[in-house]
Every structure is written in structure tokens, then in C-alpha cells.
Image (cartoon, helix red, strand yellow):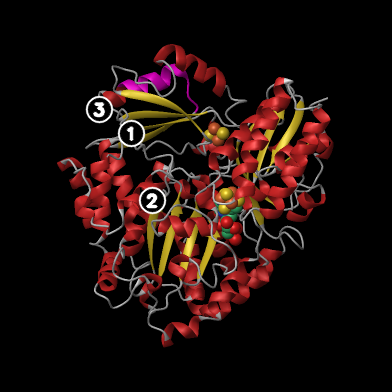
Amino acid sequence: MDLHLTAARPAPEEQAAVDSELGAAESGWEGGERRAELDGRASYGGAGKAGAQRHLLLPVLHAIQKRIGWISPGALNYAALRLDVPPAEVHGVASFYDMFSLTPQPRVVAHVCDDIACQPGGADALCTVLETKLGPEGAPCIGGRATWLRSNCLGLCERAPAALVTKAGGTAKERVLAPTTPDRLQSLLDDAVSDVMPTAADVLNTQLSVPQAGSRQLVLLRRVGRGDSADIDRYQRLGGYEALRKALDLGPEGVLQEITASRLLGRGGAAFPTAKKWEALYLQRGLLKSDPGRKHYVICNADESEPGTFKDRIIMEGDPFAVLEGMTIAALVTGAEQGYIYLRGEYPFAAERLTQAIQAARKDGFLGENILGKGHRFDIDLRRGAGAYICGEETALFNSIEGYRGEPRNKPPFPTQAGLFRQPTVVNNVETLINVPEIIRLGGAAYARVGTENSSGNRLFCVSGHVASPGVYEVPMGVTLRKLVDMAGGVGGTGRLQAVLLGGAAGAFVSPKEIDMPLTFEGARAIGATLGSGVVMLLDDSIDLKQILLRIAAFFRHETCGQCVPCRVGVVRQQEALERLVAGRPVGSNAEEIIILREMAQAMRDASICGLGQTASTALESALARWNIFS
Ligand SMILES: Cc1cc2nc3c(=O)[nH]c(=O)nc-3n(C[C@H](O)[C@H](O)[C@H](O)COP(=O)(O)O)c2cc1C
Ligand code: SF4
Ligand code: FES
């Protein structure tokens, strides 16, 4: 396709947004790498020169959206031209993500969460007042200069109800407001349209988000709330980078032995042994020397879009260097010279903190060409997602970084064989990675003495909903659900617990009768539940569970990537059947409609390509198994 023939031309402002993003991307250490690749000395995963910069598509689209407030045909064509990617493909990518608008919209947008943890916090009432004050969702308000939209979970569930305000333009800004009220939100929108919106510097409120802050029992969260988290000296004063120094002395094999001894299981949801993934790349290190085109990658999965999950945000805002240290130790073992943090797009303050931390770590020799003078080369690039839950699935994440739609790939090949740019890749969750320095500091065997045989170490839980003190809690694995609820001050709302959603929208409901379950991987499995991403959402007896189930069904319908039939069709039919049941208009009897729902769930579990389709009915099925909801 001749890109010059496309009709729409960019406005100067749009052209500047693309040019400045591409200029910035090519100026750093990473940029040098990319130039080398463009010069033909190497290529990403065998890709030829055409489209070799495609992996910059997401940052470029962000730059346009941020500057203009939407992605016009002219801007889209210019991005396509600069990146040498067909415009139709750029359109396909831009239309995949919720944070990009392909139609004009006001430069100020309030994204108001009406998801499951914000509902007990009054999200629906908030939206009703906004409709009266500002007009219908999506309509221009405040003189046509702003609008508001309902949103999926914003990862601020401990401070429900939550909103995120974005302002495009030369002075683009993002600001979260949580907890929010209609008046506070309107006043922030007024400030934003008058260009006096404050920056996001006050976002982490430790008192609100980490009720245990300061407790001597904390390990993973011990630095959160203690001083300026972007200050590298403060990080080292509080024990930071001790583990990296020790790891450099231990060497790759020694570090791998400690991780193996720790029995660390991934905290991103699938509970896969971390040492096994690392070992797979460790064993391929020899090939790095013999094949100059070969690279290994380490990726930190910071997409955190599972409704009810916010622990990774708090780590990144409150202790960003710990994430970098964990990744650097992973790189030492795996032979990776390049790492990526894939951060969910709705986390402005975490993006700011991580950017500052990466710069400080480079400056002080903890990242770069020769880490701490020991001859290791490793650097980290931050990539922001753009509002697509599926991009947390590791292979969808690869596609997203590479500049494609975030659609999962078939496995095998597994990421450790062919991951990012088709090269061996280790993907770990943020929480998994911050366990790594602790394992090296304590020794793997000592680390494994905490918790249980099959679930070692401490775990972070995101406690939200009807609870006295919501927030992230750190406890040894094996503590009971009852104990965790007590630590969080007990049941809030009416004080009468109806249900707990464990593991998020892809997780399962448990009943008050199961409150003595141990919070371990095996304990959850034993009652047909999962710890998932650590969500513990309490719902009191004032909540209509049917409405929560409907919201979960709507979430999956919205978030399916649509690539495979069982999931694409299943999530739609599931939502429709649920709507009929809730409205009292089932096809046949309630029992017959439920049989169809269960059969669809089975088909989605058996035949979907990825975990989204496989778990889209788990919460519904767990509720049907425990309660007679549609009697
Ligand atoms: C739909 C879907 C969304 C996911 N989202 C995340 C996420 O936001 N963060 C995460 O760490 N893992 C997520 N995962 C799991 C990842 O695919 C992967 O297992 C994980 O990042 C591996 O890290 P770990 O071994 O440290 O747990 C998701 C999986 C699926 C199927
Ligand atoms: S299961 Fe759903 S989200 Fe996963 S690949 Fe298939 S359509 Fe996409
Ligand atoms: S921020 Fe609203 S549900 Fe998470």
C-alpha cells in the first residue's frame, strides 16, 4: 500500500506529537539499540526493516491522544507513515484500546468507575448525580469542553468510588480522584478546563491504602510510606539493592538455587513456579553467545486490570526500586539485557514514580551498560497499556508491546521459548518480582519457612468492598480469611456478610460459612476458588448479588478480544441469559436457562484460547453453586 496516497493529512500539532515521541524514543540508550537494529545489524525476532519500529506504535498513539484528545485520520496516517505500518493496521490497533478515541471528544474526560468494588461504595448513585449535574454519559459538558464516561475498575478500589480525569493538550495531565463525590469531581473538571488542574503528586495516601504501614511485621511493604519513594538513597538506606549486590556475588546459578529453594509461586494469578521459568532461560544462555540475533527478555507484568486488584499499583507508587531490583536479578539469571515494564494505562502516578526510579537507577549504575561495575548489561523500558484487560495475559502483552492488537497467542510455544519479538522471555508479576530481593536477602530456605509447604512466603491481599478498613494487607500465606477480615476491622456496611469475592472477576464467590478457609493456593483450590490476583471483596447483605453478576458479565463481554468463537460468542450469550434471568423472562424456566448457562461455561472453559474465556463464568458458577439466586 502506498502510504502517501492516503487522503487525510495531519495537523501540525499532530505531526509534532508523533515526531517528538519518535525523537524521544531514539535518543536514549534503548534508542541506540533501535538504531542499530534499523541499520540492519540486528532485527526484532527476524522482522525485516519494514515496520521495524512498529513496537513504538503504542507510545506514538498515546502521544497523539495526549496532545489532541483523540486520534484523527490525519494523525493516524502520519503515524503509519513514520512507522512504516499500513494505516489499516494502525486503525486496527488504535480501535482495540479503550483509552484511544477515534472520534473527536472534549479534551477533558472523567472516567468514573462503576465496577464491582465501587458499587458498594456508591458508584451508581454517583453516576446518577453526575447525569443530573453534567448531563448524560458521553455528552459534552462544561461548555462542551469536558465529558464523563463510566469505566471498568480503575485499580483504586480501596478508595471507592474512584475517578480518573485526563486532560489532553500542550499541558496534558492525568489526575485520580478517590474517594470522589459529585462536587469534588465537578470542581476537578472545572479546574481542568480552566487549565489549573494540579498534577498527580499526591496520589499515594499510605494511611488510606496501607492500613498496616509502619508495622514491624511487614516485609514486602516495609518501605511503603517511609519517605520519598523515588529517592534512590532512601531506598538504599532502607536495605534496597543489598540483594542485587549479593546476587552479583552469588552469580546466576547461585541465585537460581535460592529462588528454587524459596518455592516462590507467581502472584499474577496462575501460581506458576518462578524458578522453573527462570531456569528455562538460564539453560538457553549459552546460545546468546553463538547466535548474535538472539535476545532474552524480562518483562514485569504491571497491567493489573483485574477488577478489585490494586496491590501492584501501591508497590509501584510506594516502592518502585524494589520492582527494578527484582527485574535486574531476574536478568542476571536469564541473560536478558533488556526488560520492559508493561504498566496499565490508567496508573499515572505509578508511571511517574517508575520513570523517576529508572532514571535514578541508570544514573547510579544500577541499570545500564555495566551494572555496579560487574560487567552486566541491563536496561528497562516502561510501556503503558491503553485500557485493555486482555493485555495482562502474557502473550497478548507481547503483541501489545510489539505494536499489534493485544490478542493472545496460542501456546505452545511458551514465552520461555518464543515470547516478546519471538525471543525467549520471562514474564513475572510485580508482586512476584518484589519477593525476589527478599529471597536473596534472607536465603531461599529461610524464606520458604514462612507460609505452607505449597504456598511459601507472604502474600498481598487487596481488601475492598464492605469492610471497615479497606486496603492492601500483607500476611503470611495460610492465614485464614476470617483473620484477614478481622485485621481489616471486620465487615462494614450492614455488618452482615453475604459473600466474599476471592480472586477478582475471574475468581469465585465464597460464602460466610467458608470464612475459616486458609488463604493458600491449595486452600482456595480445595473449595473450588482461587486466590487469583489477591482480591478479597466483601459484600454485605444489602447488595443484590444479581447486579454484581450482571456487572461481571458486562465486564467480560466488553473485554473479550473476540479472537476465538467460544469466548466471543459465549460472553455475549452469558450476559444475555443473565439479563433474562434477572428480568424474570427466562427462555423456558429458570432451571432450563441455568442449564444453558452451565453448558456454555463448560464450552468456554474447554475451548477458549486463553484464560479470559476459560474463567469468564467462574464467578457466576460459584454463585450458582452456593446460593439459590434465581429461585
Ligand atoms: C485475561 C488475563 C489477564 C491477566 N492479567 C494479568 C495482570 O494484569 N497481571 C499479571 O501479573 N498477570 C496477569 N495475568 C497472568 C499472566 O498471563 C501471567 O501468568 C503472569 O503475568 C505471570 O507472572 P507470575 O508468574 O509472576 O504470576 C493475566 C492472565 C489472563 C488470562
Ligand atoms: S479466550 Fe477470549 S480473550 Fe482469550 S483469545 Fe479467545 S476471544 Fe480472546
Ligand atoms: S476502582 Fe472501582 S472497582 Fe476498582
Residue type, mark 2 in image: Ala
Give the secondary structure at mark 2. loop
Q: Position of residue 280 (x, y in %)?
A: 58, 75
Residue 12, image quadrant = top left
Give the secondary structure at mark 3. loop
Tell me if residue 8 comes above or below residue 327 in the rendering: above
> Looking at the image, is mark 2 or mark 3 earlier in the sequence?
3
Tell me if residue 246 comes above or below residue 54 in the rendering: below
Q: Which mark is residue 70?
A: none
> Looking at the image, is mark 1 or mark 2 earlier in the sequence?
1
Spatial separation of the CA atoms under disc 1 and disc 2: 37 Å
- Circle 2 crowding by C-alpha within 10 Å: few under 14, some 14–19, many from 20: many
In front: 564, or 503?
564
Q: Position of residue 293 (x, y in %)?
A: 38, 79
Q: Position of residue 600 (x, y in %)?
A: 72, 43
- Circle 1 crowding by C-alpha within 10 Å: few under 14, some 14–19, many from 20: few
Spatial separation of the CA atoms under disc 2 and disc 3: 27 Å
Which residues, given as a range, are shown in magenta?
179-190
According to the image, label 2 marks what residue? 230
Give the secondary structure at mark 1. loop
- Circle 3 crowding by C-alpha within 10 Å: few under 14, some 14–19, many from 20: some
Residue type, mark 3 in image: Asp
According to the image, label 1 marks what residue? 103
Residue 176, image quadrant = top left
